[in-house]
Image (tube, coloured by chain):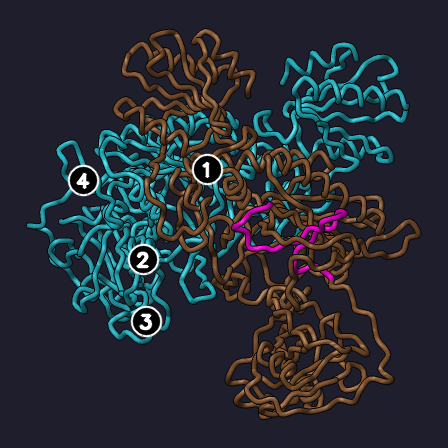
Chain colours: A brown, B cyan
Amino acid sequence: MITRMSTLFLRTLRDDPAEAEVPSHKLLVRAGYIRRAAPGVYSWLPLGLRTLRKIEGIVREEMEAIGGQEICLPALLPREPYEQTGRWTEYGDNLFRLKDRKGGDYLLGPTHEEMFTGLVKDMYSSYKDFPAVLFQIQTKYRDEERPRAGILRGREFTMKDSYSFDMDDAGLDAAYRRHRQAYINSFDRMGIEYVICAATSGAMGGSASEEFLAVCENGEDTFVRATEGDYAANAEAVITPRAEERPIDGQPAALEYDSPDCETIDKLVDWANGAGINVDGREVTAADTLKCIVVKITRPGEEPELTGILVPGDREVDMKRLEASVEPAAVELASDRDFATTPFLVKGYVGPRGLAANGVPVLADPRVVSGTSWITGADAEGRHVVNCVAGRDFTPDGHIEAAEIREGDPAPDGQGSLRLARGIEIGHIFQLGRKYSEALELQILDENGKRSVPTMGSYGIGISRLVAVIAEQRYDDKGLNWPVSVAPYQVHVVVANKNAEAAEAAERLAGELSDSGIEVIFDDRPKVSPGVKFKDSELLGMPFVVVLGRSFADGVVELRIRESGEVREVPVADILDEVRNLV
Amino acid sequence: MITRMSTLFLRTLRDDPAEAEVPSHKLLVRAGYIRRAAPGVYSWLPLGLRTLRKIEGIVREEMEAIGGQEICLPALLPREPYEQTGRWTEYGDNLFRLKDRKGGDYLLGPTHEEMFTGLVKDMYSSYKDFPAVLFQIQTKYRDEERPRAGILRGREFTMKDSYSFDMDDAGLDAAYRRHRQAYINSFDRMGIEYVICAATSGAMGGSASEEFLAVCENGEDTFVRATEGDYAANAEAVITPRAEERPIDGQPAALEYDSPDCETIDKLVDWANGAGINVDGREVTAADTLKCIVVKITRPGEEPELTGILVPGDREVDMKRLEASVEPAAVELASDRDFATTPFLVKGYVGPRGLAANGVPVLADPRVVSGTSWITGADAEGRHVVNCVAGRDFTPDGHIEAAEIREGDPAPDGQGSLRLARGIEIGHIFQLGRKYSEALELQILDENGKRSVPTMGSYGIGISRLVAVIAEQRYDDKGLNWPVSVAPYQVHVVVANKNAEAAEAAERLAGELSDSGIEVIFDDRPKVSPGVKFKDSELLGMPFVVVLGRSFADGVVELRIRESGEVREVPVADILDEVRNLV
């Protein structure tokens, strides 16, 4: 069947939609692939739906190739299982909650670990039933605080989520590796440029996890790659090498100084050098100072707790890294009000000693180890302390990854240094372990007839997001540019000649292409100018465009390759074969 | 790809699930097609999902064949457009409503007239853009009061809904007829026995509408078919022929009688005949009495209003017919408390005169026309009135369809009489007209450059419900029985011979069938007895079962036809061709 532009439910727009921030969003709306229905909620128009379905199809094939079995769970889910695992609360405002007419609590599923675990518990009872990999391609909901960038971060979206169930860790490892390969195959088939990064597990719980990040300037995630070796990680997952401890004995005693107007690190460094203070015989730098940032950490179901975060003075606290470190707890900076109502918090002069003295827990950057010496706040207006030695003058309650990662930081595996780049999460694979199977009491009889708890993996691909990611990586100033594998149509036939013969020949050609299994969109609009048709074909972005234009009178048609911009003149008699070869 | 029972995510159950009421529900759960996740909310397991997708595929093809363009709208919808059409309120408790983190009002879409209208308004502006038929196959939500019968009436379900947009009535008629034919084609391909019934439009508004009802004893809908002619209608849509008016002049005056203990029609008839009262010179029958049922009608956003419903005494009020007549208002019987707190309502003796005297509106059956004479309540304990003539002693405020339909009632078109049967709604086609396009101000420039409001049709098919409907119409005491068009697999290959050669031959046969494009499920479970395998194959209900059993040693396999129960012995060499011919 040929799709005709004359009747297609499509209107291309010249102007970018007001709410659009990123190129993929602008172009997908302008080219009539999607339309906004509400903030973060989109309708799929004919072209967009076709690309979405092709992406689904690729992922489905790769999941079936690793033995995944497709099922489909509801989006409207009962509260109970999410209560059992704690996620009813942990998800916070990100969860859409609702009540039914009888007052029963429901949620719109953000991910389905609980439900899959319950289903396996309901169906399986013996180790002989394992291993199992189940997947679905289904609509998910998250009430994002700032839905942005169109379908890159929607509140209703399509995901492939799968879950592996194994009786032992070796089985989980194998399932994880198979998923990893299925993801590589899927993203390769879609022509995406991506990196596989070490990741944090966040609210999912569990241990090993990796993220597939599409490389993209407009991405919300920062990741690092090492200049040597294979190390790559989401910035949130980078582990700072722990500094070496130093002997405490023989270090000079801590001394307090008057240091007026030193609320910033720069001023503090200037003051120290002006006062003749030095470190190991050299001038003081920002890295010799210790920032003490006061935050409030709110664990699920608990009251916020004041906490001090210590980082070397030459680094900022990266709130996303800090958030990832404390998840599922939430974290925010202490407010002016907190400072005003807490007498021992002296703004600009907070130090670890004062916090500890007042029972406030203190978590330190891995560079702050026993024997390291710092210049830090003395918990009094205009006062700092010098030679403040960890393990002697203060002892952190633990370590935390909160400091920013910087270009050139050493790679955690010692192989070269780190480079920073931006990306969009397109896939995530987790070794969950037994968090969910234990919480939901999934118990299976093992070979010895004893009850055993299976170990699980959880694996996601952001199906609808991929439409935007592919657009984002491949667009140009003329419009979209799809790879053959996910283009709504492979060939765009354009009549750009008012001659009735050209129109008939185009009709015939479109029919022949379609009959040979090629998907064709046919611009048969009689009253639209060639210029508008060309612009539209570039905006819509099919990989191959066949134009019956002026040279048609000479028996020649144009074959335009969208990606390279190449234009070939092809005799009418050869065009069918030429296109078939390309597709 | 062959699906192997040894690894399939499937456990068949011997016992019916406790919550199941109807055979399709019991069997679909027992055969591992679906599982309950919450009341009225189901998960689709591998086999069920395959049948669901096949039904979707058939409907998609037929919709595309009539020029329908597929799009996909969200399920999470903003309140505003539903507010504009009044349905935010009208849907009452059937609507799942929720708030987002910012307090914004949302709903889970029960149907998408508002959103499609808004989308067309957003995209189209000229009469040249019309006609248009848009459809989606998508998840819908209704918070049913009594979700029952599994996926026959779920709270989350899949529908195909489509919407036609035309500039004139002739266009709407054509779109409606094309949809009607697409539905006939779809249901015929699925082997469903159905009737096309005149229907009421309910909360959808609009004028002409027909329902496709699958004939089914367990159906919730009652429909009628005439013994002669083509008349068929949902019981709720049957129009009672209006009785002929009779002259009032010359009729005897109304007379009140003491009629103690006559709270029921039977007692009233006995009393009347005992008292020597007659009608047109014959004995009184129940049809000569007039029931006056007091109800409360609640219109959207208004307080309940007491109303009298008059029906001949030989008929009950059919609450479903009454509900359909007053929709979108809700209706309930007056309660004991209403009687207790309303002095002029005398239970068992309510009549139209008393209601009218107290300002209560009275709606009458179409048999209650001017000049008809009745025995009815006199609004006082133990008192009735005889010769109470409509148009003289009381005048209804209007007519209403509320009386039950009975087997043998005359057909509204005068062709024979009515027969009653039960059915399940599988499709509904509506000529909506301009209700939604007007409410949402969809204005289009017509040929003369003037603003014109398009007319709309709305058309639904209950996709997920069809899985249950087909099961319900075709099951037998052994299990499910699918037509080839929607069976999860066309062929079920069963090894029922412990001989390794038989297992190898089965493996080979399954592979060959699969290679020739046939969908195969293969019971390769090594430790399961032939008896259990046969029972499972009958329960699962694939149309053709190939058994490699005892006679395999003689070079013969069994081909079982699930529907007819026929068993053919086929030489091993011929089985591939035999099955290919059947499929």
Residue A347 in view of the camera: yes
Asked if A35 appears above or below B549 in the picture, the reply is: below
| Segment tinted magenta in the rendering | A215-239
Task: Please give the name of the residue rendered at 69% of the width and 11% of the height, measured from the top-left corner.
Answer: B577
Disc on the earlier residue, 4 or 3: 3
Task: Please give the name of the residue rendered at 60% of the width and 25% of the height, measured from the top-left corner.
Answer: B484
Disc on the earlier residue, 4 or 2: 2
Question: Looking at the picture, how far across and down is residue B177, in whole percent?
Answer: 32, 28
Asked if A253 appears above or below B285 in the picture, the reply is: below
Residue type highlighted by circle 1: Asp
For label 4, the residue is B452
As measured in the structure, the alpha-carbon distance from the residue carrying label 4 to the one carrying label 2 is 23 Å
Disc on the earlier residue, 2 or 3: 2
Specify the quadrant of the image occupied by residue A15: top left
* Quadrant where the image shows the C terminus of chain A: top right
Which sits in the foreground, B190 or B213?
B190
For label 2, the residue is B83
Q: Secondary structure at mark 3?
A: helix
Nearest to viewer (mark 1 / mark 3): 1
Residue type highlighted by circle 3: Phe
Task: Please give the name of the residue rendered at 64% of the width and 35% of the height, measured from the top-left corner.
Answer: A188
Relative to A583, is A42 on the left or the right? left
Q: Secondary structure at mark 1?
A: loop
Marks 4 and 1 belong to one chain: no
For label 3, the residue is B339
**Chain of the residue that carries numbered disc 2 in the rendered image:** B
Relative to B279, is B2 on the left or the right? right
As measured in the structure, the alpha-carbon distance from the residue carrying label 1 to the one carrying label 3 is 75 Å
For label 1, the residue is A476
Specify the quadrant of the image occupied by residue B437: top left
